[in-house]
Image (cartoon, grey):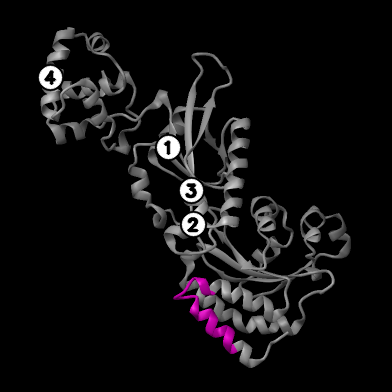
Amino acid sequence: MNITQERYDQLVNLVYETIENNAAWDQLFAALRETLELKVLQAFAFDKHHGMLSFSGGANVPVESELSYLQKYHFIDPRAAAIMALPPLEWVHDHEMLDDDFVATSEFFQDFLLPLDLRYLSGCKVVEDETLSFMIVGLRSQAQGPLAKEGAAFLSRLLPHLARAARIGVNHFIYSTHALVGHALVNRLSQPVILTNTTGKIIHINQAAKHLLDSTMLIAVNGNGQLEMPKQVLNSFLKDCAEIERQIKLNGIAEAASQQYKPLQIHSATHNQNAEKLYAFYTPLLPEKVMGSFGLRPLIMLMFYHPESTTPIDSNLLVAAFGLSPAECKIATLLAEGYSVLEIAQSLNKKEDTIRKQLQSIYQKTSTNRQPELIKLLLHLPTNPNKLADNSLNHLL
């Protein structure tokens, strides 16, 4: 190991380069791995607000094994709890807590680590606050043996500098929907939107999607914050999400940019003409493309259309923008929901000619000339999310 003072000074300089240059993190991880003669050096961040691993970076990390860890094996990693339980800057050396008998019967070691020729871990939390835990671990093979004490001591000298740089760049390691698109903006979208990670853990739900969850049993959020859908649809969705993350890891952000919206059709158990239907369209969002960081996991944005709980037209906006009367607002709203002039007349207990005369007034006030043009305008108006519950015909009449 090259643990001279000169090497230490070089690494300290590289640590502080990360503050102004995100790419320096990759250089730092590679330099640390070489210095300590590690097979793999890896860094993780656990986003406390969303309760999930949000960041993964490091040096000499095989992509397929990293994806397997993020999507499956970190849930059964017996070393993670030990690291999380200790204060920052205190080391965990797994050979001191997990003996050979444990390793011989552990699914985590037998099915994941050992086939990768990895056995020994030395790691610690670098930073912990109310938003995240950021940790760094070194992995060595069975033949290499555990990290030597002098190597751990050398890295311990660097940890305060690493912690300082990580605190300054905390947004590089946590999900931030504000940085992505902004909670306020997402909440104002009339379309129901749910953001998840690639394992279906909920990141954010806008107001329209909260209303949708109250309106249908076809989707739900369980007690662990996981998206729930009919099993076959959910399995297909999660399988595709895992492949999306894999392709992004292999091919970079260009792969995310090339991803188109993919559809999901969600049906109730009774497959007949009157069965409840829900349509979803999903696409990846890449945090680093927006935030300028480099290791955050991709998010998945789902947009929903539920024929039975379509978003209502905001009557206050119709009054403010076009000066429509309350009666005209009712007619415009029902028209946008797909009712014919005759059906509107019957619902409002008015003559069809009366409705047509009021429609002429609506056309004049909205500068439209015919029903398709008016409906297109109405469906593209912004929506007041506080009125999402008032969307039934009975409420309107």
Q: Secondary structure at mark 3?
A: helix
Q: Secondary structure at mark 2?
A: loop
> Which residue is identified by label 1?
209
> Which residue is identified by label 2?
175
- Crowdedness near tag 4: few (<14), some (14–19) or many (≥20) residues, C-alpha within 10 Å: some
Is 149 on the left-hand or right-hand side of 63? right
- The amino acid sitting under disc 3 is Ser
- The amino acid sitting under disc 2 is Tyr
Residue 142 point in image, percent of width and height? 83, 69
Q: Which residue is at a point 47% across and 70% down the rendered structure image?
A: 169
Disc 4 and disc 3 in contact, CB within 8 angstroms: no
- Crowdedness near tag 3: few (<14), some (14–19) or many (≥20) residues, C-alpha within 10 Å: few
Residue closest to the eye, 27 or 315 = 27
Residue closest to the eye, 143 or 48 = 143
> Which residue is identified by label 3?
258
> Which residue is identified by label 4?
360
Residue closest to the eye, 363 or 132 = 363
Q: CA distance from mark 4 to mark 3?
A: 45 Å
Q: Which residue is at a point 48% across and 54% down the rendered structure image?
A: 286
| Rendering quarter of residue 353 | top left
Badge nearest the viewer, 4 or 2: 4
Q: CA distance from mark 3 to mark 1?
A: 26 Å
> What span is colored magenta in the figure?
9-24
Taking the image as drawn, is residue 44 in sight?
no
Q: Earlier in the sequence, mark 1 or mark 2?
A: 2
Q: Quadrant of the C terminus?
A: top left
Q: Earlier in the sequence, mark 4 or mark 2?
A: 2
Q: Can you say whether 301 is above or below 96 in the image?
A: above
Q: Earlier in the sequence, mark 4 or mark 3?
A: 3
Q: Which residue is at a point 70% across and 79% down the rendered structure image?
A: 36
Q: Secondary structure at mark 4?
A: helix
Disc 4 and disc 2 in contact, CB within 8 angstroms: no
